[in-house]
Image (cartoon, helix red, strand yellow):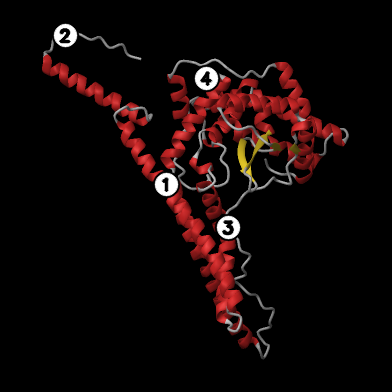
Amino acid sequence: MKAVSIGASPLGSASQEEEDAASSDDRGRVMTDRGLTAEAEPDLSRREHVSTAAAYGVACLLHILTASLLVGGLLLVVLRLKTVVQPLIGLVLVLSATVLRPRCGSLDPDLPTLPREEAPALYALLDDVADAVGARRLDVVQVSPDFSVRATTYGIRRRRRLVLGYPLWLTFAPQQRVAALAHELGHLASHDVRRGALVGSALASLTSGAEQMEHQPLRTEAAFETSPLSRYADEMAIAALRFNAHGRTASWALWIPALLMKGAARLLTRLTRSSARRAEFQADAAAARAASTPAAVSALRDRRLAGAVAIEMHRLTVAARTFGWTGSTQSVDKDFWAKVGTLTPSLRDSERNESDPLDPGPGAADSEPPGRQAEDSGLPAIGLRVSRLSMGEPLPATVLLDAVRADAIEDELGEAKRLLARRMVQDCVQA
């Protein structure tokens, strides 16, 4: 930081005023980029309130539309049984309401689940982190093969679930793990609009509905095994053309609602952009308070390891699947993660040599729950988040993950990581 001396200038008052104005503009530009200007803060807050209120309005309209489609469709089906057209229209409305229905979420049946009674040390750490960031405690933990940590809600009661990616847990240092947990729980504590019950469910409904419309197994081309010498060859060709024409019409009929859903999802994403940026910065601050500022910064920087770790895991699964693994099935489950852990230091060193520490690269995308993966999400870059954390005074850790506690948690994760390794090797799944 440059030291600024205050005093008379030998160039005269006019030059001093121009210099002050230029330096003020530079400071304002830098501070505006970081979202810290005092002058712009009221306008930014006002714009954020207006856009957030508009997002709530759009989400309410979507849920009202879904309920109206369901009720209207059921009335047309039940009360107009004497006709044919109206019940068919009612079925279309009911199907549309089904596509737009709110997604409450559920536990992933393919992931190992750790109840509280089977992992007391892990849940004790999670409770300490939740108390440190001011969030409600978690209800269940699932372990996944992804390089991420995600805190989501599920069910009508919106119980809280943590999806703990074991590759990230294995790669990160103990305090980095605390920082990653605190960041995700910080989103729940900061009342992130995109994870709320109203806007979050609307985003999930729109994105899931659009994907469901786009991936309908609709056959648009028909192939008829007919000889050109057959007496019905011309009739079969005409029938095939008509079939394909109807298929293309049905495809367009599904494509248009999917396009409307995508547009509404982009609108909600744009309206919640400023609120989501603020929630991201607040989650980073919560991570720094819980795990210390250096741990939060290093955790952000090490997100660039996601791509390299995924590639190495896929290489190990392919090698184990193709060439086999020495030893029994139990040794396969144990040696897989041991090999991943052995490769981690070399991957970290190579990434540090090849990339800017403030630019984590394309493999360092933030972990986002369903509904936040929309195009142009407007979330701040990791380099900007690192610089914001580095600007302030370093904070000490309030939650410590010592060696004894880490070993106890590792023992509790033993069965879950064995199941993940076995499934990955057997199915040759790319992490």
> Badges 2 and 3: C-beta atoms under 8 Å apart?
no
Say if mark 1 contacts mark 2, CB within 8 Å: no
Kindly give the residue lying farthest to the right in the view shown: 328
Q: Which residue is more in the foreground, 159 or 417?
A: 159
Callout 1 amino acid? Arg
- Give the distance between the C-alpha atoms of the residues marked 3 and 1, in whole angstroms: 22 Å
In space, the residues marked 1 and 2 are separated at their CA atoms by: 48 Å
The local secondary structure at tag 1 comes to: helix
Instruction: Specify whether 361 is left or right of 32.
Output: right
Name the residue that disc number 3 marks.
101
Pointers 4 and 2 in contact (C-beta within 8 Å): no
| Whether residue 251 can be seen here | no
Q: Which mark is residue 270?
A: 1
Label at residue 293: 4
Label 3 sits on what residue type? Arg
Marks 4,3: beta carbons within 8 A? no
Report the quarter where the N terminus lies: top left
Residue beneath disc 2: 8
- Alpha carbon separation for disc pair 4 and 2: 39 Å
